[in-house]
Amino acid sequence: GQIGELDASRQKMHRDNLTLTEKQRALQSRNKGLSDELAVLKSQGQVLDENLRLALRQVEQLQQVSAQQAVVFDGLRAALDGLVKSGQLRVAIVRGQFTVIMADKILFDSGKKALKSEAAGTLKELAQILGSLKGRRYQVVGHTDTDGPDDYNWRLSAGRAEAVSMFMLEQGMPPQMLSFAAAGEYQPAVPNDSPENKALNRRIDIVLIPNLEELLRPLEATEPAATTIPGGVAP
């Protein structure tokens, strides 16, 4: 009887040993999988670190460009200060662009495209100031209120923008620095819900066009490296 019990005990121990061996193999396999995942994560960490360094460099370069733009804007504001104080024009940052704003009544008679004679002095001085900033470009944009037919407003805004542009060219503004466009009634500065607001919308804007090469240069660095999440799913 004792021999039988010992034999049964031996068989049980043998089975338990086999079970433990299988568990050990499973743990070893799982450990290898975890080691592989850890290696992948370390590799991803290196890529992410490099991407972060690249992004920080781009941010620094963009900040430098922004600072340069601010210097240009401040210089233009200072140069135009006399015209602003005399009420001939206003300056503002509109959608991130330095913009000279001139009311239509200063430049044109009601409904007319021909420049008023008294506008000559202001536009001549303006052309000299803007033309002195080398390497920059401007766009003259005509705007109207909502009174009148759409096609009439388009033609009126185009004719006025052209008249201002041609006069500035005659005053020595380099042609490569200037273009003109018509916006009609479709880019109002304020809602057309009162005579005062409509007067604000009847205007000529002279917009400093951003130098896209200068702005995009920091973003043209090497593209960040791609990373792969374990399981093969790209972020």
Image (cartoon, helix red, strand yellow):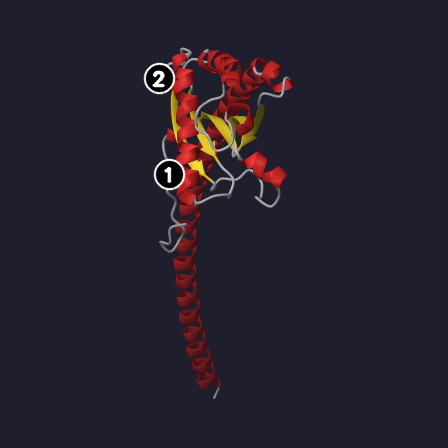
Residue contact at pointers 1 and 2, CB within 8 angstroms:
no
- In the image, residue 161 above or below residue 37: above
Q: What amino acid type should be assigned to the residue bearing mark 1?
A: Ala
Do we see residue 216 in this rendering? no
Q: Residue at x 42, y 13 (%)?
A: 134
Residue 138 in which image quadrant: top left
Return the x and y of residue 130 as percentages of the image width and height: 47, 16
Q: Which residue is mark 1?
A: 225
Q: Residue at x 49, y 28 (%)?
A: 205
Query: Which element type, helix, strand or loop, lies under badge 1?
Result: loop
Q: Which residue is mark 2?
A: 175
Query: Which element type, helix, strand or loop, lies under badge 2?
Result: helix
Do we see residue 42 in this rendering? yes
| CA gap, disc 1 and disc 2 | 43 Å
Q: Residue at x 64, y 18 (%)?
A: 85
The numbered mark at residue 50 is: none
Q: Residue at x 37, y 54 (%)?
A: 233
Return the x and y of residue 217 as percentages of the image width and height: 40, 26
Return the x and y of residue 90 as percentages of the image width and height: 59, 24
- In the image, residue 56 above or below residue 172: below
| The one of 121 and 89 positioned closer to us in this rendering | 121
**Label 1 Cα neighbours within 10 Å, binned few <14 / some 14-19 / many ≥20:** few
Return the x and y of residue 179 as percentages of the image width and height: 38, 25
Q: What amino acid type should be assigned to the residue bearing mark 2?
A: Pro
| The one of 86 and 139 positioned closer to us in this rendering | 86
Q: Nearer the viewer, mark 1 or mark 2?
A: 2
